[in-house]
Amino acid sequence: MKSRHPNKLISLGFILLLNVLLAAPGSLPARGAESEPGIMIHSLRDTLELAAFMDGLMASTMDDHRAAGAMVSIIQDGELLFQRGYGYANIADSVKVDPERTLFRIGSVSKLFTWIAVLQQVEAGNLDLDRDVNDYLETIKVPDTYEEPVTLRSLLSHTPGFEDVLLKLFMREEDDIPSLEEVLKRQMPKRVRPPLEEAAYSNHGTGLAQYLVEQVSGLPFETYADQHIFEPLGMESSTFSQPVPRRLANRMATGYSFRDGAFRKEGFEIVPMTGAGGASTTAADMAIFMETLLNHGRKDTISIMDSLTFSIMNTPVLTHAAGMNPVLHGFLDISPRHVQVIGHGGNTFLFHSQLALFPEYDTGLFVSFSGKDAGLAYDQVLKHFIDRFFPDQEPAPPLIQLEKDYLDGFSGTYLASRRPHSDILKLIGVINRAKVKVDNDNLVFTDFFGNSYRMLAIDSTSFWMPQQNILVGFERAQGEKAQKLHVSNDLIMSAERPGWFNNAWLHIFILVVTLICILYIIIAWPWIYFARRLYEKKPRTRKPLPVFSKTVAWITSLFMLLFYVLVIAAAGGEEIIFGIPLEIRVGLFFPLAAIPFIILMMATNVYIWKQPQIKNLSRLFYSLTTLVFILTILQLYYFNMLGWQY
């Protein structure tokens, strides 16, 4: 999952405003109808205005986010209202994006096809939503950490209680690609909470669901999707094959990064858990898919499942807190406060997509961008699309004023519930955090991407963010500080107050003190030693630390410094998602190599404190350094960086 950057403001002043037309059945009221002064409602049925608006919006968004190409399709009442490609599918060959022919990767939007496949097998009686998934598994098993089993219902709703696993979520075409079974054997996520308690996005949960479909159907998922979804619906330009099959290869858009002022061609990204994010498709095919979803699993005379079975995808599993959107089976409820929006977003490193359905208005929007920096582009398009065609006509919720002392109980940092626990990327969980603070008798929420929003209280644990028109809910016991935070339209990224050992400042303090000790020992000690040998004439009354003690500490410091240099040099980029870089693999050796020398330092401490002729300050520094190195080893153990845990 890719990191995002704050949204940029978009200027849409050049968009043409055309004549008022009555809305068609199923759309919003005619433009000009207002529930509040200044709110204009635009009709999607005015296709000239729609085209002008989308052309301007897409142009500005692509420019803001350095997208090489993009494509859009919009449907309403089973009719295709707008479909267009923008930019280039292949810059070198000047091939423009064609919404009917050009394939983009759609990332996690692929999961919707996987959930449909699961429900097809439920309908056929081959799978049961509430049966322990281990009953279907032979060569792999989900750990029985809790009494409650992991079920397909929990997988569909991202509530199995799995940790997040990011390592090798993507691979390159030239890599040795493991089978899905091998991935699940090596990377079966740790269960960190009971199922059906809290949603925390899980790619591996989707991968497990894909594996169950393959087991009961006897087909590879790529073949299953072709035979049971794509072919029946006439989605002839869609595939889960990676890379895409030969018949589609010349229509596959190239992925680009933007470096040194130019777009740079990148390779094809492989998603080993195909059903979690491996699909490639066109805007035209996604228009067919949206029509099928809005029509409860039917397209014309073709039905891919019974409407009653399909309705499961819209059924709530749980609600995190009052006012929060429900957690559904498969769909993500991304609704702002005033209109229902369900669907799914998806990101690879090079492609970024959003499928959004407005069931009340029988409307669907699909948008996809190519370009490494375009991770927030679809959010921008969706926001402006909603603001224009589905504006908020509801009055602001009634507000209350809470005492500052009570508001202080919400302040603090919150860790994402979706985070690694058992591998080398556990450190991400401490770094990736949201913050809440009190400012002028209101709360300010800073999300995981660094965007800050004012929150206004509507009850004792629920707050409204007027800029986003969404709600934030807290779990807070009477007389206690808030322990959990939920955002109404981002149910898969709940957050919890960290325990004391997940305090970022504690770990920063340990790191800084460790580096000070390391640099002093490696640089200052040799300089002091040789300076005294050259310039000190009078014998000292107090002895320095023994050479052996200093040598042991110097070797320990060198090993730890090599570890930090190698890890920091390789960390921070995307390479760690594709696989652990060589520098980190080598660097992980040095903390293990340092442990025997730290033990020698502990033993040496006993000796030097029995020697009164050694300066007290030297003995104290040596003992404190030993303690710091012990804490560092414990810190690395806590973050799964002691050894090769990947």
Image (cartoon, rainbow, N blue to C red):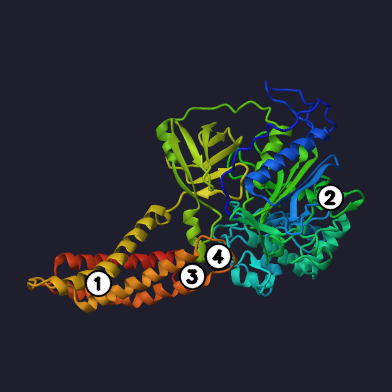
Direction from residue 282 to residue 136 in the image, left or right: left
- Depth order, front residue of 350/366: 350
User: In the image, what residue type sits under mark 3?
Assistant: Ile
| Residue 383 location (% of width, % of height) | 67, 39
**Answer yes or no: do the residues labelled 4 and 3 have beta carbons within 8 Å?**
yes
> Tag 3, which secondary structure?
helix
Sequence-wise, which precedes: disc 1 or disc 4? 1
Res. 526 mark: 1
Q: Is residue 117 above or below residue 35?
A: below
Sequence-wise, which precedes: disc 2 or disc 1? 2
Q: CA distance from mark 4 to mark 2?
A: 37 Å
Q: Is residue 257 above or below residue 341?
A: below
Direction from residue 348 to residue 552 in the image, left or right: left
> Tag 2, which secondary structure?
helix
| Residue 618 location (% of width, % of height) | 18, 67
Q: Residue at x 19, y 76 (%)?
A: 546
Direction from residue 330 to residue 26 in the image, left or right: right
> Tag 4, which secondary structure?
helix
Res. 584 mark: 3
Examine the image and state in which quarter residue 215 appears.
bottom right
Residue at label 2?
288
| Residue 22 location (% of width, % of height) | 84, 26
